[in-house]
Image: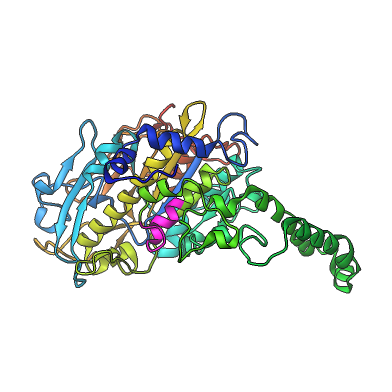
């Protein structure tokens, strides 16, 4: 576990080598809980990636070549050579480069084909037409299916099904509408999302006193807590006045759970950073995740890169048995990869995909590349981490790329860079061995570039039909094995691999 890794070994690990598999299999055996605490059979895991600002399906998985479209000069199509077909599927990839992102003097080199060819059998695109172009509203509808199940979010539904007994069944690192709770008052309280505003510091909030220098030992802390609970608080005027209040009782209940978090050692298991001069964890009695070196090889930019840090926390939370659904993704703030000071790269534009108002094509290219690169790293780890009975976590996982809406399908004549507004017409991307992978459900009208729908049972294309947010929401929950009895959700057999 302490072996130094050279570049060749890192490349081997990214391909799922036995070395990485064996190391992470060892990590799995140290999980604090079992994998079947509250449901019969294995759990399922949902990762929601928030593609903030309007990721256009026409600029990635459903891109069109100029030669395929009659009005190519005024529609958002690409030179033929930039669009790559994915063998055995109707999926498309765009590989392109640009000198700048509109007025931002940062180069773009975006390669989508590598990811699509690697995971094509697990990628499903389903066309969809949304109902809002206001960011917060559209964001929440992308995870509630426009209140399809009493306003319950996808993440809440998965946590209610698989999260009972977990310490953090539903964590959410997103912002704005993606970060909001659902509206279902019948939802079990444990299934509500735990907000994580800073994934790098979050692990240190999971212990009451570890990490403080000079703190008394565990036995003394336990004695102090016992004195507080049994003697001091019951005698206080405040407790005698308000102790029966439901709010105070809730506080007491949640405070009592602190010891469960502490006993799980989540403060160390979720910390992937190395002990160093700048981060002297051992001086504070901390012992970061023992697989940290391997994890940092796959996610080399944790810390400075907020997206890699979020993705790694999502992976650790799930594989350490704490979580069954994690939400993370692009934010509104600019981020830059400054490792090469002479040639820095922009890794998130202002307002993410919504910078398409200024520079559509390069914004879409750099951010789709960024998404696929991050998800490739996450899937790599999930594939080589054993869940149970020789199956990996990836065998039981789903990634949903959630976007509020699409973008305009038109451009001014022959412009290579152009602005776009919001358009409710788009599609969703779901990556999972649980869905009908290698498929495009629906299609694109080559006259307008608008997407059209499909038969919910067979998946056959149906020009003129529009798929609703409710239908896509239902299809994902059914693929995840969530019991939706009484919800009124429609059957979406076409989206399930083993329907």
In-image side of 460 versus 327 (left or right) = left
Along the line of sight, the residue nearer the viewer: 283 or 433: 283
Along the line of sight, the residue nearer the viewer: 65 or 196: 196
**Quarter the N terminus occupies:** top left
- Residue range in magenta is 301-312
In-image side of 34 versus 327 (left or right) = right
Tell me, yes or no, if residue 10 can be seen here. Answer: yes
Q: Position of residue 221 (x, y in %)?
A: 76, 60
Q: Is residue 111 magenta?
A: no
Tell me, yes or no, if residue 454 can be seen here. Answer: no
Q: Residue at x 38, y 35 (%)?
A: 19
Q: Position of residue 349 (x, y in %)?
A: 30, 66
In the figure, 239 relative to 275: above or below? below
Along the line of sight, the residue nearer the viewer: 222 or 487: 222
Q: Residue at x 51, y 26 (%)?
A: 389
In the figure, 365 relative to 118: above or below? below
Residue 244 sits in quarter: bottom right
């Amino acid at each position: 576990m302490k072996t130094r890794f050279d570049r060749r070994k890192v490349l081997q690990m990214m391909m799922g080598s036995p070395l990485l598999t064996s190391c992470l299999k060892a990590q799995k055996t140290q999980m604090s809980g079992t994998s079947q605490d509250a449901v019969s059979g294995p759990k399922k895991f949902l990762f929601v990636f928030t593609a903030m600002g309007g990721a256009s399906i026409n600029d990635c998985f459903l891109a069109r070549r100029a030669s395929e479209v009659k009005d190519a000069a005024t529609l958002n199509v690409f030179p033929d050579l930039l669009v790559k077909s994915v063998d055995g599927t109707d999926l498309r990839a765009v590989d392109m480069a640009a000198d700048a992102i509109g007025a931002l003097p940062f180069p773009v080199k975006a390669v989508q084909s590598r990811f699509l060819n690697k995971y094509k059998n697990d990628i499903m695109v389903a066309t969809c037409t949304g109902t809002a172009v206001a960011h917060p509203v559209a964001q929440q509808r992308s995870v509630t299916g426009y209140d399809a199940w009493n306003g319950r979010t996808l993440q809440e539904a998965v946590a209610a099904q698989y999260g009972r007994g977990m310490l953090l069944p539903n964590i959410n690192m997103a912002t704005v509408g993606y970060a909001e709770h659902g509206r279902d008052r019948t939802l079990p309280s444990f299934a509500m999302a735990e907000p994580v505003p800073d994934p790098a510091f979050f692990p240190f909030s999971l212990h009451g006193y570890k990490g403080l220098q000079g703190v008394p030992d565990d036995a003394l802390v336990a004695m102090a807590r016992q004195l507080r609970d049994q003697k001091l608080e019951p005698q206080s005027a405040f407790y005698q006045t308000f102790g029966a209040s439901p709010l105070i009782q809730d506080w007491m209940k949640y405070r009592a759970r602190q010891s469960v978090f502490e006993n799980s050692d989540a403060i160390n298991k979720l910390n992937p950073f190395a002990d160093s001069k700048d981060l002297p964890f051992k001086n504070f009695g901390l012992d970061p995740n023992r697989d940290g070196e391997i994890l940092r090889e796959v996610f080399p930019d944790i810390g400075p890169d907020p997206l890699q840090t979020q993705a790694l926390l999502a992976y650790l939370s799930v594989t350490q048995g704490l979580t069954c659904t994690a939400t993370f993704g692009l934010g509104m703030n600019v981020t830059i990869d400054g490792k090469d000071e002479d040639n820095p790269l922009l890794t998130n534009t202002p307002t993410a995909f919504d910078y398409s108002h200024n520079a559509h094509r390069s914004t879409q290219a750099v951010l789709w590349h960024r998404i696929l690169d991050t998800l490739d790293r996450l899937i790599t780890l999930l594939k080589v981490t054993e869940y149970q009975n020789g199956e990996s976590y990836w065998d039981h996982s789903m990634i949903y790329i959630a976007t509020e809406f699409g973008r305009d399908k038109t451009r001014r004549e022959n412009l290579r860079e152009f602005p776009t507004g919001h358009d409710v017409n788009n599609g969703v991307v779901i990556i999972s061995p649980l869905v009908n992978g290698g498929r495009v459900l629906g299609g694109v009208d080559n006259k307008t570039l608008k997407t059209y729908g499909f038969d919910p049972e067979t998946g056959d294309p149906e020009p003129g039909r529009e798929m609703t947010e409710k239908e896509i929401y239902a299809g994902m929950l059914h693929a995840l094995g969530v019991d939706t009895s009484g919800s009124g959700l429609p059957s979406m057999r076409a989206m399930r691999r083993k329907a």
